[in-house]
Structure formats: structure tokens, C-alpha cells
Amino acid sequence: LRHVDTHLLPNSFNGGTLRHLNGNAGIGAGIDSFYEYLLKSYMYLGYDYYWDMFQIQYRSALKYLRKGPWYIEANTKTSRASHFHFNSLQAFWPSLQILVGDIPLSLSTINAFFSIW
């Protein structure tokens, strides 16, 4: 389902047909657990396959979805921005960044997220 060029994965698809329900990629609602469980699967099971999948998705998210310390939703095919919004399910992202050792970026993200308080 991920796009061959951008490697962006849609945040929702039909489980029966494996067709996109929308063409948006993000880090929040609809896709947050996928990132989380790719990393956890690698950490707990130790299979390099999960790490490789995670790295592809993480690099793609940083390249196409990161706008400063914030993350947007973008079209999976064109990588053009489709939504500029923050949703609460994005809040896991800084913790995931800490787990992979991306501390400076995590702190930038945390500070942005908590600035809305």
C-alpha cells in the first residue's frame, strides 16, 4: 500500500480490498499504532525486517510530513500537504523519537506539542 516513490502509507484503507479509503499519510489518527508497533515488534522480537520497515516509514515521515517541529498530512502519491492540523494521536511521536535516539528532534516536537497548553 505504500507509495513506491514517497514510501508514504495511507492512514486508512479497506481491510478487505486493501484499497485506500483516502490518499492521506500522517503520523496521527489511523496510522499512529502502525509506527509504534513496527518499532515495538523490532524491539521485542528482534527481527531486522521490522526495523527496516520502521526506518523506511520514519525517514519518509520526516522527509514529507515534518514541517518544523510539527507534522502534517500529505498526499501519498504527490507528497503535497493535504491537512495542517494537530490531533491528540500524534502525541506518541516524541516518545517514539526518543526510543530511536532522535533526542534533539524529539525535544523540538515535545516543545511544539506542549506549546498549545
Image (cartoon, rainbow, N blue to C red):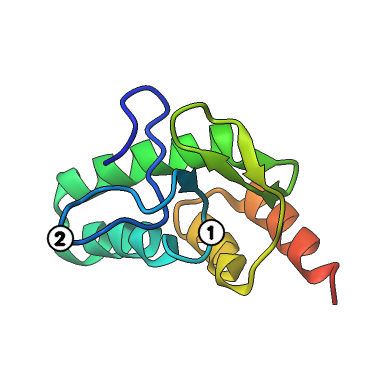
Q: Report the disc number at residue 28.
A: none
Farthest residue toward the bottom? 117
Residue 65 in the image: above or below residue 86: above
The residue drawn where x is 26% and y is 48% is 19
Q: Position of residue 78 (x, y in %)?
A: 51, 26
The quarter of the picture where residue 9 lies is: top left
Q: Are marks 2 and 1 in contact (CB under 8 Å)?
A: no
Residue linked to disc 2: 16
The residue drawn where x is 45% and y is 36% is 76
Residue 11 in the image: above or below residue 51: below
Q: Position of residue 89 (x, y in %)?
A: 55, 71
Q: Secondary structure at mark 1?
A: helix
Q: Is residue 8 left or right of residue 43?
A: right
Residue 55 in the image: above or below residue 87: above
Q: Check disc 1: other Cα within 10 Å, few if <14, some if 14-19, many if 20+.
A: some
Which-is-in-front pick, marks 2 and 1?
Answer: 2
Residue type at the position of mark 2: Gly
Q: Report the disc number at residue 98.
A: 1
Q: Is residue 8 left or right of residue 82?
A: left
The residue drawn where x is 56% and y is 40% is 74
Q: Position of residue 46 (x, y in %)?
A: 16, 56
Q: Nearer the viewer, residue 52 or 17?
A: 17
Residue type at the position of mark 1: Ile
In the picture, the quarter occupied by the C terminus is bottom right
